[in-house]
């Protein structure tokens, strides 16, 4: 049995349950894991219920179940599924660590607010994904994997026919033709899931390396007749296309999309407006009864022109589902993965029994987005 160190750091989690959120940033298994690393845990009452964890489940493994105010008063660091609101930030004690997807790419005002409040912000969206030591901290990968799985199930549920080919006494039903736009983590999971459901799957991504990944899963790669040979971007994401490249891609996708029954789009870029992959002309060209699941739908727009969060049916009978919250709908699995990501980020910063930022450390330099001045030490 692994030795459990004496607790020197207290990690806390608040209840973030809402209409769209069922995940929690701490699970009982992770409480046990953190105790072995010398971290004690506090969690708000009822925080894990939507992910199917009771307060007793946490108490049994040594966590303290408290009120929200007590969690805030006791925690040295707080982990979040979504970034804390301004109201929550105002309640936090100076020098508290805030760990989560903080939107640091685009919302400098929010990061400034963390700084002004004397809080240490750890932006998990800044994780250098190419580092092997950071793989277990990669929330984008873990949650997008869940999202891609659920997107294929949602599409199958909304589609008015079978995904697999079926031969019956009344005749043969052809398999659904599914197009996945974006072959990153979510797209690859959607490909695998749709294939297991029996659909004929085709996928497209601007990154050259994605062709081999798509074909390795038994799907076809959609040939648009375009060459974006420098499609690989920084940190493992697809690079932003020029205006001319994006227009050419959109026109080609619009033309090809008409041959598919189901389209799933997964091209999300953290903190930034998602690229439009299917225009209104492309949507209008789809057959009646076609289904689109846009995983990138948001207040900033989506991968599909005109998509919004929720379900809509066009005049041409095409169903468009804007579904950015799919990971939350697989709350237990998603919470387990996310809690591990957050916990491993936390443990990385514990040095000599204290939460510390070390200048010159590649992960520290990338992840700390606010409050460096109140905690940094010399390497």
Image (cartoon, helix red, strand yellow):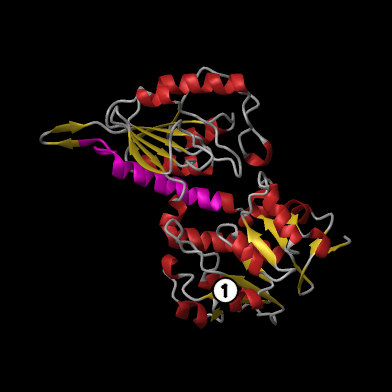
**Residue drawn at x 10%, y 34% as measured from the top left:** 170
Q: What stretch is highlighted in magenta?
A: 141-166
**View extreme (left): residue:** 169
Q: How crowded is mark 1: few (under 14 residues within 10 Å), some or many (20 or more)?
A: many
Residue 298 on image: x %, y %: 50, 43
Q: In which quarter of the image is residue 42?
A: bottom right
Whether residue 158 is in magenta: the answer is: yes
Q: In this view, does 378 lie above or below 111?
A: below
Report the label total.
1
**Residue drawn at x 59%, y 59% as measured from the top left:** 85
Quadrant where the N terminus is found in the figure: bottom right
Secondary element at image label 1: helix
346 on left or right of 374? left
- Work out whether residue 346 or residue 174 is closer to the camera in this orientation and state it: 346
Q: Is residue 137 above or below residue 32?
A: above
Residue 92 on image: x %, y %: 66, 69
What is the magenta segment's predominant secondary structure?
helix
- Work out whether residue 113 or residue 344 is closer to the camera in this orientation and state it: 113
Whether residue 282 is in magenta: the answer is: no
Q: Is residue 20 above or below residue 79?
A: above
- Work out whether residue 11 or residue 237 is closer to the camera in this orientation and state it: 11
**Residue drawn at x 87%, y 60% as measured from the top left:** 379
Say if residue 132 shows up in the picture.
no
Q: Disc 1 designates what residue?
A: 31
116 on left or right of 248? right
Residue 220 on image: x %, y %: 43, 29
Say if residue 198 shows up in the picture.
yes
């Amino acid at each position: 049995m692994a030795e459990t160190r004496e607790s020197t750091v207290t990690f806390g989690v608040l209840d973030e349950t809402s209409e769209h959120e069922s995940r929690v940033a701490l699970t009982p298994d992770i409480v046990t894991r953190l105790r072995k690393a010398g971290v004690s845990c506090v969690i708000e009452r009822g925080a894990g219920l939507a992910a199917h964890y009771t307060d007793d489940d946490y108490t049994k493994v040594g966590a303290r179940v408290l009120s929200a105010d007590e969690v805030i008063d006791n925690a040295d660091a707080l982990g979040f599924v979504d970034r804390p609101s301004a109201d929550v930030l105002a309640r936090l004690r100076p020098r508290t660590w805030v760990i989560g997807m903080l939107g640091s790419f685009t919302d400098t005002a929010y990061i400034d607010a963390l700084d002004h409040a004397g809080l240490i912000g750890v932006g998990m969206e800044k994780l250098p994904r190419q580092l092997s030591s950071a793989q277990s901290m990669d929330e984008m990968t873990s949650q997008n994997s869940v999202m891609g799985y659920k997107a294929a199930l949602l599409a199958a549920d909304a589609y008015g026919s079978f995904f697999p080919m079926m031969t019956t006494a009344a005749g043969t039903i052809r398999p659904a033709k599914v197009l996945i736009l974006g072959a990153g983590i979510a797209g690859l999971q959607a490909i695998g899931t749709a294939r297991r459901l029996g659909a004929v799957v085709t996928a497209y991504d601007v990154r050259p390396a994605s062709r081999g990944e798509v074909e390795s899963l038994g799907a076809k790669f959609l040939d648009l007749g375009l060459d974006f040979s420098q499609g690989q971007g920084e940190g493992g994401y697809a690079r932003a296309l020029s205006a001319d490249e994006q227009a050419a891609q959109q026109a080609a996708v619009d033309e090809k999309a008409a041959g598919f029954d189901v389209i799933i789009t997964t091209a999300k870029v953290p903190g930034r407006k998602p690229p439009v992959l299917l225009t209104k002309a492309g949507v209008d060209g789809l057959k009646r009864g076609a289904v689109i699941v846009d995983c990138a739908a948001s207040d900033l727009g989506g991968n599909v022109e005109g998509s919004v969060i929720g379900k809509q049916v066009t005049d041409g009978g095409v169903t468009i589902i804007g579904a950015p919250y799919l990971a939350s709908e697989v709350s237990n699995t998603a919470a387990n993965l996310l809690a591990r990501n957050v916990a491993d980020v936390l443990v990385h910063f514990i040095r000599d029994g204290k939460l510390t930022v070390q200048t010159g450390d590649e992960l520290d330099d990338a992840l700390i987005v606010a409050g460096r001045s109140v905690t940094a030490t010399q390497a």
